[in-house]
Image: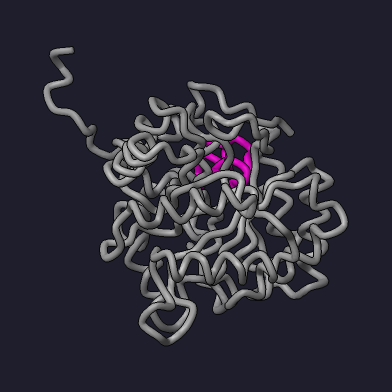
Amino acid sequence: MQYNRLGNSGLKVSSLCLGTMTFGDGADMDMCKKLYTLSRDKGINFFDCANVYAKGESERILGKLVHEHRDQVVLSTKAFFPTGDTINDRGLSRLHLTKELEKSLKRLNTHYIDVYYLHSFDKETPLEESLSTLNDFIRQGKVLYIGLSNFAAWQVMKALSLTIQFNYDPITCIQPMYNLLKRQCESEILPMAHGERLGVVPYSPLAGGLLTGKYLKARPSDGRFERSGKMGEMYQRRYLNEVNELALKKFLKFAEENNFNPVSLAIAWVNGHDSITCPIIGARNEEQLKPALESIAIDMTRDLRNEISGFSLAPAIATDRTEEV
């Protein structure tokens, strides 16, 4: 396992981060312990969570697992999405962030959170209010580093300028979606992160499981694409189209012909981008996790990455008339 600096900070994190969205939602306590131990044995020291995962159960489970060696691991969690029925149980207001931080600290059974993310941009709350609140958390010793998740490039740059203007603690990292079928962040977000020396901890490197190949033959009844309600519809809208299907078939054929596990290869491709600090991997059982962990063994050369990149459509570049440069 390699360890990388998280952005422009002195904090070093493993080149893979274990996401815990399945903890308490697909994996029970016994299985979570196995997944956690397997990850730690492989050298992972970075664990990602959120206050809304399994309605808080993911944080509770993770807190129990890390308690005996809290100082050896890096924990991240997030806040933004609704946690209750009242009007203020959501968003990035000082009220909501303060309440949710205290709940997360209690569930994680810790006095501090290493990386605290704003989970999404809040159109209704001034960004100055949110960043001021995070700055206070750091002053109080409850948060060590600040991250932004699901922010557009312009929103990140606005946040960066505000931290400079008001002399707040800096933003250390961002968390965008990134995989072979969802490459929008290559246009502006990743170049911005590189230029601003931000850590990049992308999620969904397997495109909701599509890049494993398991959905080509038959969709598992317990898979994300078959879930009822908004979650299942979201994944279907995000990925299920003819362009992605063609790219997926090319990728899986290449993996088979070259003796790669598609899970390992897909994650290694994400990790092979120069701007990436560490992708977030996740699993519901050991069988799913092992090939994700083995992605670090793949030598993702520039030629190999370019060949795989050719299977899907790259996003349009952000600047016009580049042919003249």
Q: In the rendered view, would you say 97 is above or below 134?
A: below
Residue at point 45% right, 34% down? 308
| Colouring mode (rainbow / by chain / secondary structure / one colour) | one colour
Residue 322 at x, y percent in the picture: 17, 20
**Position of the C terminus by quadrant:** top left
Q: Residue at x 51, y 26 (%)?
A: 304
Magenta-colored segment: predominant secondary structure:
helix
The picture places residue 194, in percent across and down from the top left corner, at 42, 27
Q: Residue furthest top?
A: 325
Residue 325, above or below 177: above
Q: Which residues are magenta?
A: 252-269
Depth check: give the residue in front, 303 or 12: 12
Give the quarter of the image for residue 123. bottom left
Magenta region includes residue 228: no
| Residue 157, horizontal then vertical, whole percent | 31, 38
Number of numbered discs present?
Answer: 0
The residue lying toward the viewer, choosing from 259 and 163, is 163
In this rendered view, identify the residue nearer to me: 279 or 132: 132
Residue that appears at 66% across and 64% down: 105
Q: Position of residue 265 (x, y in %)?
A: 58, 40
The residue sitting at the right extreme is 68
Q: Nearer the viewer, residue 11 or 24?
A: 11
The quarter of the displayed image where residue 94 is located: bottom left
Whether residue 55 sits left or right of residue 183 in the image: it is right
Residue 16 placement, left or right of 156: right
Q: At x 35% / y 63%, what residue is drawn?
A: 240
Where is residue 278, by image quadrant?
top right
